[in-house]
Image (cartoon, grey):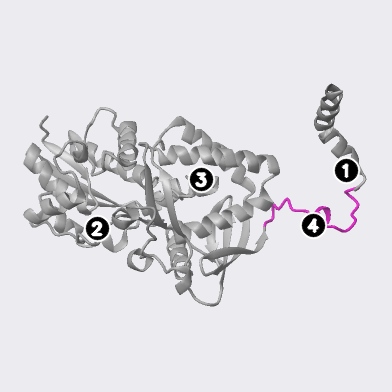
Amino acid sequence: MKQYKRVVLAYSGGLDTSIIIPWLKENYGCEVIAVSGDVGQGTELDGLEEKAIKTGASKLYIEDLKSEFVEDFIWPCLKAGAKYEQYLLGTSFARPVIAKRVVEIAKAEGADAVCHGCTGKGNDQVRFELTIKAFAPDIDVIAPWRIWDIKSREEEIEYAEARNIPLKITRETNYSKDKNLWHLSHEGLDLEDPANEPLYDKILEMGVTPEKAPDIPEYITISFEKGVPVKLDGAALDGVALIEKLNEIGGRNGVGILDIVENRLVGMKSRGVYETPGGTILYHAHDALETICLDKDTAHFKAIVAGRLAQLVYNGQWFTPLREAIDTFVNKTQETVTGDVRLKLYKGNITNAGITSPYTLYDTAAASFDEDEDFNQADSAGFINLFGLPIKIKAKLDESRKN
């Protein structure tokens, strides 16, 4: 193998990266500098520095990326309404912000390679490496899962045990998880078979199932300015605090639990359970506000753009000209998406309880069943005749050909 003097590792402290530090030192004899991007993992970062140093890293950077994560990655996707097969992109848009910081530290430290713990079957390897290419196109990337002899998570645990590396999991709780401010994902073990119902009481961490939610509904009001949520129940909050609060509210009401089989970028299908309580509330509220603030053609075209953006984000193509161009379009559509959305949360459900906006396009008089001065119902006949003319002509010609 090519030898390196200094390698910067994207380090989470989970099973994969916990064993990668000693593996790098054993196979390359290099200095390992670990970098953890704090995107809202919470207690998962506790004791991480001590663990990284004990397992062979020369130092650990813990970078607070939460505000950048929200402002530069979450909000653009929320404003666009981007979803990939119902999935709210929780892991997808966390990777570029982390990888970007890893590259910045690698450059500052004079590293000659960067390393990640993504598997060869997953999407994250692409997300990390496309970001690395965008900011350090010539630096080498080490991906142990693509070159080492370890073939399973069971073998990873054995490797860790042989080197006295502390782990927070056991063979029985060895789910593959990803946690950040926006979501928590669960994969592996019994979830690998779509025939199995998830053991929600065992895996849920951000909230409860709808069955265990309160028997009375909870009402909240979210205020938006140009598509960005800025207040909760009248109180101004920054993005991080607002998402954290909505996670609490949504979690206790059984909101935001998603069990899907998705189509991975690399080709196979994958089953996962996602907890996104605050994000699910925000997407619902934002969509509701747009129903009164966007005209029909813009709303319909924006839905097409949202699908394309979701593919870009899911596929790791954040730092691309097309993503930037879509962002410009979306921001234009959001200039009038300002207002308040009142929601009722009840046992996993979110229902609208009132939408208002100073830029509303909803005209009560025009929409009313009562007579009004602006709409002459007799005009509809001419409209229908013209709108239906192609159908009428085809039907008459088809009939004449039968004769």
Per the image, the residue denoted by label 4 is 364
Question: Who's the residue at 9% across and 43% down the image?
Answer: 25
Whichever of callouts 2 and 1 sits on the residue coming sooner in the sequence is 2
Q: Secondary structure at mark 2?
A: loop
The answer to whether mark 3 and mark 1 are in CB contact below 8 A is: no
Q: Is residue 325 left or right of residue 374?
A: left
Per the image, the residue denoted by label 2 is 174
Per the image, the residue denoted by label 3 is 82
Please, is residue 201 above or below residue 363 in the view?
below
Give the magenta range: 357-376
Placement of the N terminus among the 4 image quadrants:
top left
Per the image, the residue denoted by label 1 is 380
Measure the C-alpha gap from mark 1 to mark 4: 19 Å
Nearest the eye: 354 or 64: 354
- Judge depth for marks 3 and 4 and give the one in front: 3
- Amino acid found under the numbered disc labelled 2: Asn
- Judge depth for marks 1 and 4 and give the one in front: 1
x%, y% of residue 269?
38, 43
x%, y% of residue 42?
31, 61
- Amino acid found under the numbered disc labelled 4: Thr
Measure the C-alpha gap from mark 2 to mark 1: 63 Å
